[in-house]
Amino acid sequence: MAPPALLGSLCSLLLLLLLLPLSSTTNAAGINDKYNNDLDVGTSSHVFRKRRGSITDASCQQSGTLSCRGKSYPTYRCSPPVTSATPAVLTNNDFSAGGDGGGPSECDGRYHSNSKHIVALSTGWYSGGSRCHRMIRITASNGRSTTAKVVDECDSMNGCDEEHAHQPPCPNNVVDASNAVWHALGLNIDDGVVPITWTMA
């Protein structure tokens, strides 16, 4: 007969082996839930087809929520830190009068042609207008890059009103770009949302 200490160790090992698949399944489900949480959301400038989660950073916490059409959306005063290759999502915006961007651009109170290389940045990156008329460099995962001028804010605090084309607040990690930027990067506008990196040019 095996010593009691050995039996105890064997029982512990057997229990661990039985629980391991359960904990792995739970973790996998949690990960899948995070990335399958695709939903229709909007920005102050453009309606997303999908959002695959936003970048999280300990220094940028959600500041509140805003209810819009029966759904609750997070609001942010901040965005993740800007680096030499800041991860973001690229969306498409119509900066012209009557387009889906709502009111005129924050930087100059004007509408703009979508043939120009222009963008709106999430509230934290817009930084109270300190990046207005400054150039940023955007790089796509296909290796192509281009520069664009900041002309507007993709409002991460407000939305669901006429000024914001009745769209929810923008996530805190968005570069909302004109058609010209998408074309320069060799991207398909119909994709709606694509991962990119950006930095100040």
Image (spheres, grey):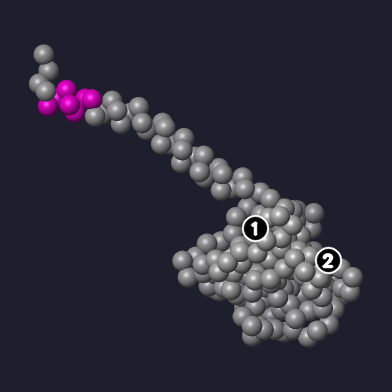
Residue 107 locus on image (x, y percent) = 74, 84
**Which dot marks residue 84?**
none
Our reading of the magenta stretch's main secondary structure is: helix
| Residue type (three-letter) at the residue carrying disc 2 | Asp
Q: Which residue position is annotated with label 1?
A: 72
Residue 123 locus on image (x, y percent) = 64, 74
The residue lying at 74 percent from left, 57 percent from top is 69
Along the horizontal axis of the image, is 32 left or right of 17?
right
Along the horizontal axis of the image, is 83 left or right of 100?
left
**Quadrant assignment, res 167:** bottom right
Q: Is residue 187 above or below residue 82?
A: above
Asked which secondary structure carries label 1, the reply is strand
Mark nearer the viewer, 2 or 1: 1
Give the mark, 2 or 1, whose residue is nearer the N terminus: 1
Q: Which residue position is annotated with label 2?
A: 100
Residue 159 visible? The answer is yes
Residue 181 visible? The answer is no
- The reply to whether the magenta stretch includes residue 167 is no
The residues colored magenta run 5-11
